[in-house]
Image: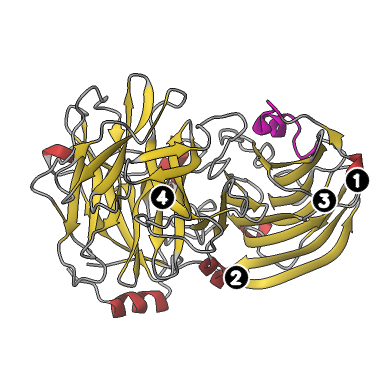
Amino acid sequence: MQISVIRFVAFCLALACVGAESSIEQPYRTAYHFQPPKNWMNDPNGPMFYKGVYHLFYQYNPYGPLWGNITWAHSVSYDLVNWLHLPQALSPTDPFDIKGCFSGSTTILSDGKPAILYTGVYANDSQVQNLALPANLTDPFLTEWVKSPLNPLIIPIDGIDPKNFRDPSTAWQGPDGIWRVIVGGHQNGQGKAILYQSKDFVNWIRSTNPLRSSAKTGMFECPDFYPVSINGNYGIDTSSQDKLTKHVLKASFNGNDYYILGSYTPQTDNFSAESDFLDSSFDFRYDYGKFYASKTFYDSSKKRRISWGWIAEMDGDANALEKGWSGLQSIPRSILLSKTGKQLIQWPIKEIETLRAENVSIQEKQLKGGSVLEVLGVTASQADVEVAFDLTNLKEAEFMVPDGVDPRALCSQQTASFRGMVGPFGLLVLASQGLTEQTAVLFRIFRSHEKYVVLMCSDQSRSTFREGPDKTTYGAFVDINPRQEKITLRTLIDHSVVESVSGKGRACITARVYPALAIDNQAHLYVFNNGTVDVTISRLDAWSMKKAQLVSANI
């Protein structure tokens, strides 16, 4: 059934947000992150922009808040902030997907029509790749999708593990007009991005060599492959033939989304990577916290590439059953190549700033060692914070050789309460009165032989006094020279999720937290310095955030 644009606008204007429960009954449900009204959600699938509408598909259990019965749910938006939930796009109704419609991607074909490639699971757990097309291209929301009668199109043969063969990427078209796609796989003890080619998007032939393989990683889940512009301020289409590009290969494994950069030659389908996954010197991840199975798409309307990532729960199945839901999506992030060309830069999309409400600003405020400053005047459980710190006494920084140092382990061993020299300093978010509960997003500065080392931590060790929730602390080194630039941090706080971005997008850490005291108007926000060296808040801006509109179509 077609749903009119007018109807969607009417829903949004009516502010008919999903979820009848009050925040007291659902203290961990987010206000401006994407979530379905109820039940289980995991991987984002097939995000795309088509004829003025953003589409997000995602892995969904329509029957409960635990994993199982996996379908492709479907939502649409005009701004990536406010969403209309539509009927499920794909359900496990056929032999080739009877045990689940697993992850995949959308591709805009040469004639401008969208297509879905997704993984289906047979009754014997063998995984295959299938095609689905819109039933009605005049429907602005593409509500109904039809599976191809030729499914499955790609099957696991020639030694591919049939139970580890999934998640087709967005396809790209070479200068020869032939489509390429990669599928995550596992073969002979190696994780692989297995490459396939097709002239018609139906008949696929496996290439002789994979696009990439690694014996270090296990299976490549949810692989993604796309170009980024060198010295550019815009994203580019997945099939771009621009020579001034690098290519990104992302793979999900070990609970994180890792990426490598390199050069791609479409004539030979050779991807020459600058490093390998898990190289000690190049630990590149989209996010160093709780963020997985991400998917990017090219937004042709604003010439940008946008990523989504799944943020799982960290408080167990029993709590999911009690809440009636599990999982959320990250705030969409724009992706660019850094000016140095060494890594990616990520930043929350501009549209999220439309939810900003009351603002509090602090400028040129000195934070003496051991001090804590409360930021008043914002809704601390639902906020957007940007802060820049000035450091003038770097010669006092402790010495460290970063080679071989695990930043996550260091953050776990020396938490926010550790008394260092230059740091720890940063934000205490979702904090209770008296700081019994707190999640610390912090920095420490070290001296090395020829440079300074900036450590970023997200410390959840005191995030709740509840027993049960995972309180893992995360960490990352940030490529910042504190002699030449300020230490910057942006943190998005939304009841049970804390997304932090440092170095103007050079490092991201996402955390899930479940405070028992710091809930709603009992949550507080602080800036702190637990180092012995004074630091200066060059500028801090904090905004209360309005609630996004998430409504369900009644069709």
Q: Secondary structure at mark 1?
A: loop
Task: Work out whether residue 135 or residue 513 is closer to the camera in this orientation and state it.
Answer: 135
- Residue 125 location (% of width, % of height): 22, 29
**Would you say 177 lies left or right of 440 here?**
left
Task: In the rendered view, tell whether residue 251 sits above or below residue 178.
Answer: above
Question: Which label sits in the foreground, 2 or 1?
Answer: 1
Q: Quadrant of the N terminus?
A: bottom left
Q: CA distance from mark 4 to mark 2?
A: 32 Å
Going by the numbered disc 3, the residue's amino acid type is Arg
Going by the numbered disc 4, the residue's amino acid type is Tyr
Magenta-drawn stretch contains 405: yes
Q: Quadrant of the C terminus?
A: bottom left
Q: Is residue 220 visible?
A: yes
Q: Considering only order in the chain, which callout, 3 or 4, is on the residue closer to the N terminus?
A: 4
Q: CA distance from mark 4 to mark 1?
A: 44 Å
Q: Is residue 56 visible?
A: no
Name which residue lies at 73% across and 51% down: 427
Residue bearing the label numbered 1: 533
Q: CA distance from mark 3 to mark 2?
A: 32 Å
Q: Secondary structure at mark 3?
A: loop
